[in-house]
Image (spheres, grey):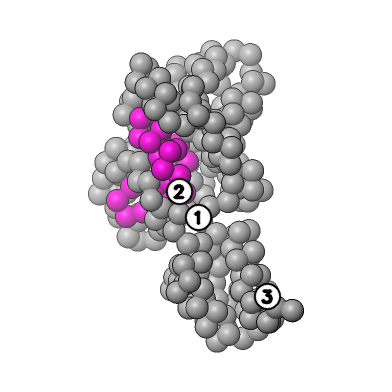
Amino acid sequence: MKKPKSVRQERILTELNQAPSLRVAELARRLHVSTETIRRDLDEMTGQGLLNRTYGGAVRSLSTEPSVTERHTLFVAERERIAKAAVQILKGAQVLMIGSGSTTVHTARRIAVEMKNITVLTHSFGVATVLAINPTIKVLMLPGDYHATEGATVGAHTVSFLNSFYADFAILGASGLGPDGPSDALLECGAVYSAMVARAAGTVVVADHSKQDRLFPARYASWRDINHVVTDKMPGDDLKNNLGDNGVKLTVC
């Protein structure tokens, strides 16, 4: 039989799979233990590389993120608001590039409802599927190696194919919104996103509040390369100032 501490720490990881960041008090309430016990657990688990401590709480360890299927169940209402606001930025565009991810799928679904007679290049099967409800939207599916957990194509062929096109906007998600740019947990997807940024006249990053002030291995652009960030909560002063200093227009919905 497992020791109670082992069971409790497994439960903490389970809770962080449902909400990417949690406060000590909230974890203590959910697990019916003291805040002191939670703090000791978080310190121990941080030492094991299972998570990262924050001021007053914890977040998933760097480079870990649920699959895109799991992410579709999180922050649904927030992502729908983000999608609705993002489409307003895209009005008048004729060619779009859309990256993989759960928030970009929400945005693509809104695009399918509100826009017509456009061309979309994407490497995400989820994005292509929701766009299919609108027969006036031409979808170009990017070639490449299939990444099962992300539901997208990646690799050298994907990037090479993008280099033959230009777009009015790239619409991209992010695993983290850090001090110097958006980043992704998957290096392969980060390379595709970088190529999309380079081939688009403007870039819109769509990301819910759980991504703010988080760092992941693949920083795919600097903030000076990004035109818009659409999120559901006002970021902290440091991130907000970094966006402003680099001319990024922030939309909070």
Mark 1–mark 2 CB contact (< 8 Å):
yes
Q: Is residue 172 left or right of residue 102?
A: left
Which residue lies most toward the right here? Answer: 1
Q: Is residue 1 magenta?
A: no
Q: Amino acid at mark 3?
A: Val
Give how far across and how far down residue 113 sits, in percent. Answer: 62, 25
Residue designated by label 3:
7
| Cα distance between the residues tagged 1 and 2 | 6 Å
At x 43%, y 31%, the residue is 155
Residue designated by label 2:
185
Give how far across and how far down residue 77 sits, in percent. Answer: 63, 47
Is any part of residue 216 visible from this angle? yes
**Quadrant of residue 6 within the rendered picture:** bottom right
- Most foreground residue, 131 or 184: 184
> Relative to residue 75, is residue 41 depicted above or below?
below
At x 37%, y 17%, the residue is 165
Where does the magenta region start and end? 172-195
Residue designated by label 1:
64
